[in-house]
Amino acid sequence: MKISQTFGLIAMAALIIMLVGGGIVTFQQMLTHENKYNINSSQAQIILLNDSNISMYYKTFFHVQDWRVNRTTIANGSIHDMYGKTVTPKEDVWKVEIMERTCACAGIKPIYVIEGYVSTETGEVFNVSTKKVSETSYNASTCASTTCH
């Protein structure tokens, strides 16, 4: 085997090791971040879906898992409570977004959206809303992430 081929194999192996190692470190950081809260992102979604109005909306309009996107992120700063009043929680809050396309056909279509804020410490729900909007007016990544185009 030529020296250049050997060097190429060693470089490729090193790159693979770095990528796998980086992925492991990133995953561990996500777990550490998630573990510092009393309520994790999955629990926040369940809390939101247990609301009677949200539960009915979900049962009525959300039918196809492959067309759905669930996203839970930490929201910083001020948020709106159930009455539209701006509040700044003392603790971090999860912003829970559950979205589902109305069909899998090509093109920009309406999506059903459930959105809410849940305390990372107590599970208190600060705001919940439901809506049907165009993908472009809400979030274009919804469509891309469900590989409909």
Image (cartoon, rainbow, N blue to C red):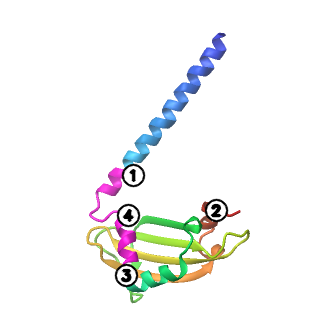
Whole-percent x and y of residue 134? 64, 78
Image: 24 above or below 82: above
Q: Secondary structure at mark 3?
A: loop
Figure disc tally = 4
Instruction: Inspect the image, locate mark 3, and give the three-letter code of the amino acid beneath it.
Output: Asp
Could you tell whether 39 is left or right of 60 in the image?
A: left
Q: Disc 2 marks which residue?
A: 144
CB atoms of marks 2 and 4 within 8 Å: no
Instruction: Inspect the image, locate mark 4, and give the three-letter code of the amino acid beneath it.
Output: Ser
Q: Nearer the viewer, mark 2 or mark 1?
A: 2
Q: Nearer the viewer, mark 4 or mark 3?
A: 3
Residue at 48%, 71% in the rendered image? 97
Q: Would you identify the image quadrant in which residue 105 lies? A: bottom right
Residue at 51%, 36% in the rendered image? 19
Classify 10 Å Cα crowding around label 1: few (below 14), some (14-19), many (20 and above). few
Q: Would you identify the image quadrant in which residue 81 lies? A: bottom left
Q: Which residues are magenta?
A: 31-50
Residue at 73%, 68% in the rendered image? 106
CB atoms of marks 4 and 3 within 8 Å: no
Q: Secondary structure at mark 2?
A: helix
Residue at 48%, 83% in the rendered image? 57
Prevalent SS, magenta region:
helix
Q: What mark, if any, has residue 41 been given in the picture?
A: 4
| Label 4 to label 3: alpha-carbon separation | 16 Å
Classify 10 Å Cα crowding around label 2: few (below 14), some (14-19), many (20 and above). few
Q: Disc 1 marks which residue?
A: 30
Instruction: Inspect the image, locate mark 1, and give the three-letter code of the amino acid beneath it.
Output: Met
Q: Quadrant of the C terminus?
A: bottom right
Q: What mark, if any, has residue 51 been given in the picture?
A: 3
Could you tell whether 71 is left or right of 134 in the image?
A: left
Q: Is residue 116 magenta?
A: no
First in sequence, mark 1 or 4: give its number.
1
